[in-house]
Image (cartoon, helix red, strand yellow):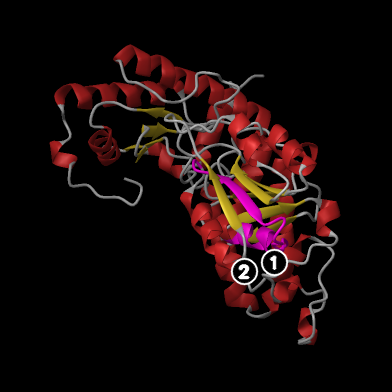
């Protein structure tokens, strides 16, 4: 698998001209064409006004959802669009009714907290939450998760890639156990979509949620929810709205007559500008190809490991390249201050408690950038050269 020509894509991402950008696990670099796409949105609104709804906007969720589908191995018409993954999870869980004999939700302590907050809030409706604990390295052993799924389990939700460690869970094994016990599965692919090859159809998963914010380089406001096609035909989520209606402009106040495609999983009026922003990144990822992206990612993460070891910086991340997605967490002394110093000097990374500095190269990054980043990190650590940057504050630390 050759990745020799990937550097030609660098000119498509303006921030790379001035910044060593290693934070695609949090926010992917903006494609140059995104500005043009958003300008097209503004021009359409300015010149077509409300007519834009019937000319494109009303079906744009289907258009973007189908582009997502081509990246994750989903058939056309099976991916709905949402504001964020928490909302997507709400829609999926709204297809499940708790019963005394089957009311358990199973999730992971290593999942992103937003979903755990949401699932805890559902206990007032009769759900019983089981949060499977993680080991000190923030990984949840597969057997521990499988053992938590029993005959009372109604819904299993877990991260395909754990956000702190970038560890890839064995999704197929979990889906198989859940289905054997009669439970539905939501796989959170926010840290897998766009960085590792995916085939949600082959996995047989019931729901797959993710977003364009990170590795898909699409910006905020465009999360998605794949629903298994046979399940989609009968799904009736309690969280719904007029976008899911087959004939919304009849303004009928009776029961919803749901669409036959994934838009039946939608609710209120969506954010059209976010769709325009997401399209260029989705098109670029599809053009580059997930196999080549994965090969490049393995090359770059291996370089991070090699240099971290050379400088004596520990890492909690797995050394198994088949179990590591796109991020290597490196934990030098005073990692929080070091991360802030790096960002102040245009080496953009982030910090997470317990794991240290997350370094997340994408296909558009280079070995030279890895080398420069690690040299700068070592220099900051050696000289404790972060006092001037200690007051830097950021929502991503």
Q: Residue furthest front?
A: 101
Does residue 159 appear to the left or right of 72 in the view shown? Answer: left
Q: Secondary structure at mark 2?
A: loop
Whether residue 389 appears in magenta in the rendering, the answer is: no
Q: Is residue 166 above or below residue 392?
A: above
Residue 103 in the image: x percent, y percent? Answer: 67, 57
Q: Nearer the viewer, mark 1 or mark 2?
A: 1
Cα distance in 3D space between marks 1 and 2: 9 Å
Does residue 378 appear to the left or right of 194 in the view shown? Answer: left
Residue at the spot of label 1: 266
Residue 153 in the image: x percent, y percent? Answer: 69, 49
Magenta residue span:
87-110
**In front: 251, or 171?**
171
Residue 67 in the image: x percent, y percent? Answer: 71, 50
Residue 178 in the image: x percent, y percent? Answer: 73, 42
Q: Residue at x 58, y 44 (%)?
A: 216
Q: Can see residue 5?
A: yes
Quarter of the rendering occupied by the C terminus: top left
Q: Can see residue 221?
A: no
Classify residue 349 by image quadrant. top left
Q: Residue at x 55, y 69 (%)?
A: 42
For the residue carrying disc 1, how many other residues have a C-alpha within 10 Å: few (<14), some (14-19), or many (20+)?
A: many
**In front: 315, or 269?**
315
Q: Is residue 121 above or below residue 207?
A: below
Q: Is residue 253 above or below residue 206?
A: below
Residue at the spot of label 2: 270
Q: Secondary structure at mark 1?
A: loop
For the residue carrying disc 2, how many other residues have a C-alpha within 10 Å: few (<14), some (14-19), or many (20+)?
A: some
Q: Are marks 1 and 2 in contact (CB under 8 Å)?
A: yes
Classify residue 87 by image quadrant. bottom right
Does residue 387 appear to the left or right of 324 in the view shown? Answer: left
Whether residue 104 appears in magenta in the rendering, the answer is: yes
């Amino acid at each position: 698998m050759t990745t020799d020509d990937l550097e030609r894509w660098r000119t498509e991402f303006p921030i790379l001209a001035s910044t060593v950008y290693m934070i695609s696990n949090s926010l992917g670099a903006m494609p140059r064409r995104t500005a043009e796409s958003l300008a097209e949105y503004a021009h359409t609104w300015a010149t077509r006004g409300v007519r834009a709804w019937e000319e494109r906007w009303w079906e744009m969720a289907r258009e973007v959802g189908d582009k997502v589908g081509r990246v994750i191995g989903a058939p056309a018409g099976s991916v709905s669009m949402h504001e964020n993954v928490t909302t997507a999870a709400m829609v999926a869980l709204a297809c499940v009714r708790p019963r005394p004999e089957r009311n358990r939700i199973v999730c992971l302590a290593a999942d992103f907290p937003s979903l755990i907050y949401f699932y805890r809030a559902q206990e007032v409706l009769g759900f019983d939450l089981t949060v499977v604990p993680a080991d000190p390295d923030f990984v949840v052993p597969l057997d521990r998760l499988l053992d938590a799924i029993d005959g009372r389990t109604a819904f299993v939700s877990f991260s395909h890639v754990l956000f702190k460690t970038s560890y890839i869970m064995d999704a197929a094994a979990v889906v198989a156990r859940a289905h054997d016990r009669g439970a539905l599965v939501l796989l959170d692919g926010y840290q897998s979509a766009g960085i590792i090859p995916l085939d949600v159809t082959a996995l047989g998963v019931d729901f797959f949620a993710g977003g364009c914010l990170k590795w898909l380089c699409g910006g905020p406001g465009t999360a998605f929810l794949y629903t298994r096609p046979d399940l989609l035909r009968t799904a009736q989520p309690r969280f719904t709205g007029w976008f899911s209606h087959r004939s919304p402009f009849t303004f009928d106040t009776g029961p919803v007559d749901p669409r036959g495609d994934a838009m039946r999983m939608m609710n209120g009026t969506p954010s059209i500008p976010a769709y325009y922003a997401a399209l260029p990144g989705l098109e670029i990822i599809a053009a580059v190809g997930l196999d080549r992206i994965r090969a490049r990612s393995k090359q770059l993460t291996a370089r991070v490991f090699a240099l971290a070891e050379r400088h004596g910086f520990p890492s909690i991340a797995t050394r198994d390249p088949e179990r590591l997605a796109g991020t290597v967490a490196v934990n030098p002394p005073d990692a929080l201050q070091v991360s802030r110093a790096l960002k102040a000097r245009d080496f953009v990374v982030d910090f997470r408690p317990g794991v240290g500095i997350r370094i997340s190269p994408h296909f558009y990054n280079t070995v030279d950038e890895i080398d420069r980043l690690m040299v700068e990190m070592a220099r900051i650590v050696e000289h404790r050269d972060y006092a001037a940057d200690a007051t830097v504050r950021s929502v991503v630390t």
